[in-house]
Amino acid sequence: MKLTFLGAGSTIFAGNVIGDCMCSDVLHDSIFALYDIDGKRIEESRTILEAIRKNCGGYGRIECYVGEENRKKALRGADFVVNAIQVGGYDPCTIIDFEIPKKYGLQQTIGDTLGIGGIMRALRTIPVMQSFAEDMAEVCPDALLLNYTNPMAMLSGYMQRYTPVNTVGLCHSVQVCSEVLLRTLGMEDKLDGRKELIAGINHMAWLLEIKDKNGVDLYPEIKSRVDAYLANPDATDKVRMDYIKHFGYYCTESSEHNAEYNMFYIKSKYPELIQRYNIPIDEYPRRCVNQIESWRKGYEEILENGVKVHTRSNEYASRIMEAIVTGNPYQIGGNVLNKGHLISNLPADACVEVPCLVNGSGVHPCSVGALPVQCAAMNMTNINVQLLTIQAAVTGKKEHIYQAAMLDPHTGSELDIDTIKKMVDDLIEAHGNYLPKYQ
């Protein structure tokens, strides 16, 4: 079997996904093809993965491919392709995505999924993923693409609608959603044997049902504890708890993410909300700086001792590969096109996150039916932006970028239309060759 990892310079993530495969008796004797445009980073990834491979028994083989001219070689004959690229990186593109909006008074926390940061990131990334699709159609047409790159719904939705590549989008928030909620509210005794149903869109999929091992609905007890949690000035997951209070349901991704997916919490006219909900403005740039430094120190330690122990993570990728190779079924939360209205009150061309059964014949999305009206309405405020951003990428029309930004709930609630358009123009100019289509 061959696994190709696109963006293997994303060293920590490549280590997790490929390390998981190396821990699998089904997958460990595979070819692991690493691809990146940065030769230095890919060698760092090779060093880490060789240390993991050595510790896991020395099975399989690692190959490295650097530069676009070698991409087809990396992909040729692949059974699975993992995408974890970040076009433009932290410096300069993430910095631009935060600093220019800040000049217009627009504050962000993460900026990788929605909002003006998510829009720009999608527009930088879609052309690169289109080139991946063209190469895959030529040299590995039957491969399954596992997309981990954000903005998940925009990128996976584009690939599923406009390319022939078999694609599923994967996140890590579904796996930990109910566990985090129960632990946060001191309900750890309800973890074992719990049953749940999660559906919606990436980063805003709703915990629609949560029951204990005896089938007892846990939401009444959860809701009885929310007010006390919100009253704690040191609590950090307040946005999602506020969702429970006002919309009736908890959602998958963290409060720092969800703080910027709506018009409620980051408001220049109400600066006290930032403190009340402990919203970490400019969180993603801080994380990038800290991760770069943490990675440098960790890499030096690996070079010194030459061995790295890897414990299999909760990422879906290796479990999906195992299920397809062995035929043993496995359930995931996957990002797929809403074909046949898997979620009946969301658009058919939206990318939704629903339970999916994986077996020897692939990934099979499950029908969920209708979301509660208020949950579907919240999702639609995000889907509007996602679909318009994809439309901008397909048509090359700047007007669709303006419209996506205007309809973004956070951006539209803070800025007037003329200011939004000027900010978009400034961002496009600053990104330069990363957005040549719109110059």
Image (cartoon, rainbow, N blue to C red):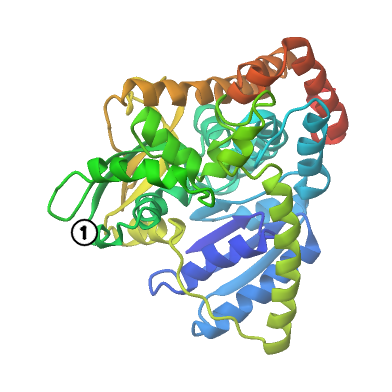
The spot of residue 290 in percent (x, y) is: 72, 61
| Residue at 62% across, 78% down | 50
The spot of residue 360 in percent (x, y) is: 31, 53
The spot of residue 180 in percent (x, y) is: 40, 54
> Which element carries disc 1, helix, strand or loop?
loop
User: Would you say 137 lies left or right of 179 here?
Assistant: right
User: Would you say 340 lies left or right of 120 here?
Assistant: left
Rendered-image quadrant of the C terminus: top right
Q: Amino acid at mark 1?
A: Gly
User: Would you say 303 lies left or right of 91 here?
Assistant: left
- Residue located farthest toward the left when viewing the structure as drawn: 214
What residue is shown with label 1? 193
Q: Quadrant of residue 339?
A: top left
Q: Is residue 80 visible?
A: yes
Q: Nearer the viewer, residue 176 or 432?
A: 176
| Residue at 39% across, 49% down | 177
Give the answer, above or below, for where 219 lies relative to 437: below
Q: Nearer the viewer, residue 57 or 420?
A: 420
Q: Is residue 142 visible?
A: no
| Residue at 54% across, 81% down | 309
Within-10-Å neighbours for mark 1: few <14, some 14–19, many 20+: few
| Residue at 79% across, 63% down | 39
Q: Nearer the viewer, residue 298 or 170?
A: 298
Q: Nearer the viewer, residue 76 or 42?
A: 42
Give the answer, above or below, for where 9 lies relative to 206: below
